[in-house]
Amino acid sequence: MTRSYDVVVVGGGIMGLSIAWSLARRAVGKIALLERAFLGAGGSGKSGAIVRQHYSNRLTVQLARASLHVFQQFDQIIQGPPVFTRTGLAIVVHQNDLPALQTNLQMQQELGIDVHLVSAQELAELDPNARLAEDEVAAWESEAGYVDAVQALSSYAQACQREGVEIQEGVEVRAIIRQGNKAIGLETNEGRIGCGVVVLAVGPWISRLADSLRLDIPVQAGRTQVALFRRPVEMSRRMATCVDFVGQIYYRASAGDLLHVGSIAGEEAQDLVDPDNYSEVADASWVPRIRQRVQRRCPALHRCYGRGGYAALYDLTPDWHPILDRCPNADNVYLAVGFSGHGFKFAPMIGQLMAELIIDGQFRSLDASPLRLSRFAEGQLIKTRYSYSVIA
Ligand SMILES: Cc1cc2nc3c(=O)[nH]c(=O)nc-3n(C[C@H](O)[C@H](O)[C@H](O)COP(=O)(O)OP(=O)(O)OC[C@H]3O[C@@H](n4cnc5c(N)ncnc54)[C@H](O)[C@@H]3O)c2cc1C
């Protein structure tokens, strides 16, 4: 083999970069990161990158919380410009879902998160654009916001390079070359590459490599859509991020007075696609439907200006939670895939945890073992309190 590395990270999305950086910080030797296209070409570059801590499970709350702290201080920890914009988050549910909401709020509060129920009046003070109907209730998570995903990718890449990681774009891994229970190399479009350890952070493309691992990895590529609108000038600039369970949408402000709106209806699981051959344009029939739903929450948006939309991929697992594990039949191959449309906010902690699993042989910062691959065969799927999968 012409080239050889102690660690090869496959996939140049936010997870691959965060993992490569965390490994490099722990001096594991020579590291390469291989990306088939360009950094962020998968879901990461198109992400809403909302960072909220509202989840049904302690593990995901803790992953989000610890990662939020990194995003808040990104310019110091990773370096480069700040990437996090704090907006606060409104979580809106029908009053029938109040018990589930309260249970989640209590768990979040126990973990130190500033979140509480708010009245319609209080919500209007926090976000003058948002309206609540009489049969709806809202909670407010004050620290939430969103990340500039493309800047975060770029800053992580530069941080990796400062730590000596070799980033190679345009290099596609086509197969994993095994000898017994070990991977000894990778077959790529640029020839064979030798490896000590392999980390697969390839998002929905994991199915392409599952055969050479002789492993069933239950991750499917689902097409999701985003609509973009230019906000009218008379709308308040103070705009919270919102997860609207009643309208089954999420939205957040975006650069240039745009609004980024997506669905939380789980439609992606019905639109399974070939990750190399899907329409990247939003459907003409979908955008007006989303527009109606967002106008219901923010009436001032009845004068918003359409700016089209786009489609991207989620890497869906059966329980909409990721897989963080060592491959059961290849000792030196690790998996960090299946983030199911809500992983960006976890990225800093995923890097740290994967570095722990690889170097220390176990997760140390948090017990992430519930995210093991075998949970699907064991019937130990992660449960959520909501029927809206992406909110998990
Ligand atoms: C529209 C949208 C909105 C989202 N909104 C949010 C949000 O608000 N909050 C949140 O937390 N999360 C959100 N997410 C989810 C989040 O963006 C993803 O979970 C996260 O970006 C996944 O990162 P990744 O690195 O695992 O995968 P990806 O970004 O898909 O990266 C995988 C990379 O691997 C490369 N690759 C694949 N196969 C190979 C190979 N064989 N050889 C070399 N390279 C390969 C691909 O080209 C790709 O660049 C959203 C996602 C989308 C699509």
Image (cartoon, rainbow, N blue to C red):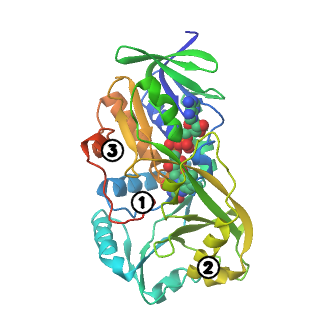
Labels 3 and 2: the sequence-earlier one: 2
Name the residue beneath numbered marker 2.
295
Labels 2 and 1: the sequence-earlier one: 2
Report if the beta carbon of the residue with label 1 is closer than 8 angstroms to ligand 1.
no
Query: Is 193 in front, or is 365?
Result: 193
Above or below residue 317? Residue 134 is below
Dot 3: element: helix
Report if the beta carbon of the residue with label 2 is closer than 8 angstroms to ligand 1.
no
Name the residue beneath numbered marker 1.
389
- Tell me what residue is drawn at x 47 percent, y 46 percent: 347
Q: Position of residue 318 (x, y in %)?
A: 39, 49
Dot 2: element: helix
Q: Position of residue 334 (x, y in %)?
A: 40, 30
Query: Is 200 in front, or is 124?
Result: 200
Residue 283 visible here? yes
Of the 4 image quadrants, the one containing the C terminus is: bottom left
* Label 3 close to label 2 by CB (< 8 Å): no
Name the residue beneath numbered marker 3.
371
